Image (cartoon, grey):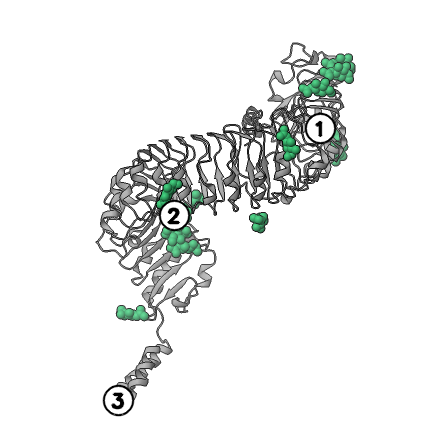
Amino acid sequence: MQPLQFTCKKHCNRLPIPLLGFAVLLLISLATPTSSCTEQEKNSLLQFLAGLLQDAGLAKLWQEGKDCCEWEGIVCNGNRTVIEVSLEYRGLEGSITPSLGKLTGLQRLNLSYNSLYGGLPLELVSSSSIMVLDVSFNQLNGDLRQLPSSASGQPLQVLNISSNLFTGQFTSATLKGMENLIALNASNNSFTGQIPTHFCNISPSFSVLELCYNKLSGSIPPGLGNCSKLRVLKAGHNYLSGTLPEEIFKATLLEHLSFSSNGLQGMLYNTHIFKLSNLSILDLGENKFSGMIPDSIGQLTRLQELHLDYNSMSGELPSTLSNCTNLITLDLKSNNFSGELNKVGFSNFPNLKTLDLRLNNFSGTIPESIYSCRNLIALRLSSNKFHGQLSKGLGNLKSLSFLSLANNSFSNITNALQILRSSKNLTTLLLGMNFMNEIMPDNARIDGFENLRVLAIEYCLLSGEIPFWIAELANLEMLFLEGNRLSGPIPAWINTLEYLFYLDISNNNLTGEIPTTLMAMTMLTSEKTAAHLDPRVFHLPVYRGPSLQYRIPIAFPKALYLSGNKFTGVIPPEIGHLKALTKLDISFNNLTGPIPPSICNLTNLQLLDLSNNNLTGEIPAVLENLYFLAVFNVSNNNLQGPIPTGGQFNTFPNSSFAGNPRMCGPGLNHHCTSVEVGLAPTGSRGLCGGDIVFAVSFSVFIGVGVLYDQMVLSRYFG
Ligand SMILES: *[C@@H]1O[C@H](CO)[C@@H](O)[C@H](O)[C@H]1NC(C)=O
Ligand SMILES: *[C@@H]1O[C@H](CO)[C@@H](O)[C@H](O)[C@H]1NC(C)=O
Ligand SMILES: *[C@@H]1O[C@H](CO)[C@@H](O)[C@H](O)[C@H]1NC(C)=O
Ligand SMILES: *[C@@H]1O[C@H](CO)[C@@H](O)[C@H](O)[C@H]1NC(C)=O
Ligand SMILES: *[C@@H]1O[C@H](CO)[C@@H](O)[C@H](O)[C@H]1NC(C)=O
Ligand SMILES: *[C@@H]1O[C@H](CO)[C@@H](O)[C@H](O)[C@H]1NC(C)=O
Ligand SMILES: *[C@@H]1O[C@H](CO)[C@@H](O)[C@H](O)[C@H]1NC(C)=O
Ligand SMILES: *[C@@H]1O[C@H](CO)[C@@H](O)[C@H](O)[C@H]1NC(C)=O
Ligand SMILES: *[C@@H]1O[C@H](CO)[C@@H](O)[C@H](O)[C@H]1NC(C)=O
Ligand SMILES: *[C@@H]1O[C@H](CO)[C@@H](O)[C@H](O)[C@H]1NC(C)=O
Ligand SMILES: *[C@@H]1O[C@H](CO)[C@@H](O)[C@H](O)[C@H]1NC(C)=O
Ligand SMILES: *[C@@H]1O[C@H](CO)[C@@H](O)[C@H](O)[C@H]1NC(C)=O
């Protein structure tokens, strides 16, 4: 109406009366819409509704009689024509009827995040009005090959069919008429065959192609080089093979190039890579690339993320990398890179947040220039050949939250801890397999670490005692001190760590009794405490051994590993308080006395290893209550009497009981006499309550996980 008034003001006195009257009429008709959406449009929408199995209340919102332009999720233009249907996150179930294709003015259709199934109607894809079609995050299926080659010149610009169940190939006939397509997101389906390239030739402005998480195979088609407007090309997590074709480097507008997790090989050539000077994300991780990082990488001055992890690349890092001054993430883990890092001017990376060099052959000391990366949040140098003492500069990294130096040859742990304590934001500190044969720094000299949640100083052969400064790590959730030579007792303050739920002090030289304070650990005594834990993910996934990977701390079991020490005395009956415990290993100590029947209350236990002690008495029959127990070992003790026969006890191998000459059972050399069977305590099961019905079905599944976990138990954490 604005232009009309303007026209009037300027020309009114010159307008002949009839024309003025017409203008007024027009004004009135625009201001008070007498017409609503047409009956036909309304019917098309109602037909769509009728095709749904579950409309989650939409029918109520769309009451008949009202103008459909006013309906929830519907937008009309000034002509009362439906131009937009936005029904995302509506809980819709059922199939999409073709009736929406009859909305001749429909430009945008968004049905994402519902539970729609069946095929995608051709009427929508080949519509002569729809420009934006988003049906992502549904369960649509079928094969796009079935779309007939439609009339050319379709207006469709954005097609998002990602996160559905589509199958089949993209043939050159598929989506042939899409001359205006700009973005196609087909990620997270089950498409097969080759990467489609015909868009590059038929649609001059085609710029976004996302095909991640499908089953695409074959090599990367050179035809992609014809996509001169391509900005985003993502085809990670497929089965692609071959090399990066030279032609792809003709797509010089590319900003995001990702082929992670495929079977690609070959080298990155100096004469190619620099052509993609607009790249900000290059992700070629989890492939079979070899060779060096070419010098010309330095010309990618916009690069923010470089992921070359899990390849077979080698050589030194080129000094020209220093020219990539916008780097935020540099992930080179699990390759064969070598040499010292001093050539790279890390001080040129003021924005660097993540540097992951795990599992390479880097050597030398940590270059001082790293300490000027003030925004560094995660630094992992584990499993290389770094050496030397940490420098004071490390204390400058005030944002540092994740630090792993594990499995190198760093020295002077006293120095390391004194420097690191000023990194107030540190939550995860992994130092294992360094500082060999040094002494665990004691009490008063360390403080700080207010936010530390995970501390690992394992397999360092450190002597000394479990130091008191650990008592002050008020937020500690996991403590790994195994594989040292720590002596002395388990400190009584251990239960003041109210978030600690994982304690591994196995394979040390610890003595004394198992303190009853350990039986009062807050996190282990209540099953409802997980809510207090920090749900945040590790900044980098952490590794335990070659293949066990954790992304969140709470994925770890609630566990006490005390094995391989010199603990004496009895297992405190109060152990029955640790109701949340899933793994308990006290093997290879010098414990005496009976197995406390109260263990039957630890109903979450998956692993119970009491082997290689000097325990006496019988196995309490109430342990049959442990429905989830997958690994049980009491071998090499001094136990006697019959092996319980109910519950999970039917699933344990004879080796679980071996080396107890006075124990009897069907699988052992010593068969039970009627006297021995008679001695077995019966009827005490009630003390633990419950029944044993579900036991066997769970055991197989959990058994695998536990065994696997144990296999890698001896590995460091990095
Ligand atoms: C209304 O429809 C006419 C004819 O179809 C078209 O030219 C005009 O642009 C439309 N007006 C609006 C506001 O969409
Ligand atoms: C569709 O809706 C979802 C959820 O609101 C939104 O994230 C997405 O960007 C929309 N799609 C398009 C193409 O605008
Ligand atoms: C679908 O993809 C388009 C184009 O990439 C994008 O704009 C839209 O936000 C995506 N939809 C969702 C739900 O992410
Ligand atoms: C493309 O689809 C995937 C999977 O649904 C989604 O994660 C991604 O954000 C989408 N891309 C865009 C630009 O919307
Ligand atoms: C893939 O799609 C499924 C089902 O829609 C969804 O739950 C999942 O988050 C998607 N994965 C990715 C990586 O987008
Ligand atoms: C890139 O780095 C090299 C060596 O560090 C330097 O000689 C060169 O001038 C830099 N090039 C650009 C474009 O900054
Ligand atoms: C430390 O962590 C907190 C919480 O994650 C964050 O808000 C703060 O900015 C961080 N401090 C620095 C110096 O990065
Ligand atoms: C280890 O570090 C401490 C504290 O920085 C220092 O006093 C000591 O001399 C260092 N030891 C060696 C062997 O360098
Ligand atoms: C363990 O401690 C004892 C003294 O309690 C000592 O004699 C022995 O050498 C220590 N063993 C190791 C491997 O450190
Ligand atoms: C175990 O303890 C007993 C007595 O408590 C002692 O005689 C024996 O030497 C100890 N064995 C080991 C291996 O420490
Ligand atoms: C198991 O716990 C219950 C409740 O705490 C207790 O009454 C019972 O005595 C315990 N059973 C054994 C065998 O200690
Ligand atoms: C087991 O304990 C008995 C005494 O209870 C002791 O005589 C024996 O030496 C101990 N055995 C081992 C292997 O420590």
Where does residue 343 sit, x and y in percent of width and height? 44, 36
Q: Residue drawn at (29%, 38%), measured in percent from left and top? A: 271
In the shown orientation, is residue 183 left or right of residue 413? left
Q: Nearer the viewer, mark 3 or mark 1?
A: 1
* CA gap, disc 3 and disc 1: 101 Å
Question: Residue 650 appears at what percent x and percent y?
Answer: 61, 21
Of the two numbered discs 3 and 1 on the same chain, state the one appearing first in sequence.
3
Whether residue 562 can be seen here: yes
Q: Quadrant of residue 111?
A: bottom left
Q: Tell me where residue 500 sits by quadrant.
A: top right
Residue on which disc 1 sits: 465
Q: Callout 2: few (<14), some (14-19), or many (20+) C-alpha neighbours within 10 Å?
A: some
Give the structural element (helix, strand or loop) at label 3.
helix
Residue at position x 28%, y 46% in the image: 251
Mark pair 1, 2: CA separation = 51 Å
**Amino acid bearing label 1:** Glu
Rendering coords of residue 539 (x, y %): 53, 41
Q: What's the amino acid at mark 2? A: Arg
Instruction: Tell me the distance, in whole angstroms, between the alpha carbons under discs 3 and 2.
Output: 60 Å
Dot 1: what SS? loop
- Judging from the image, what secondary structure is the residue with disc 2 in? loop
Give the residue number, with chain letter if any, for mark 3.
14
Left/right placement of residue 524 relative to residue 105 reads right
Quarter placement of the N terminus: bottom left
* Position above or below: 481 against 7: above
Disc 1 residue crowd, few under 14, some 14–19, many 20+, Cα 10 Å? many
Looking at the picture, tell me which residue is in the foreground, 236 or 16: 236
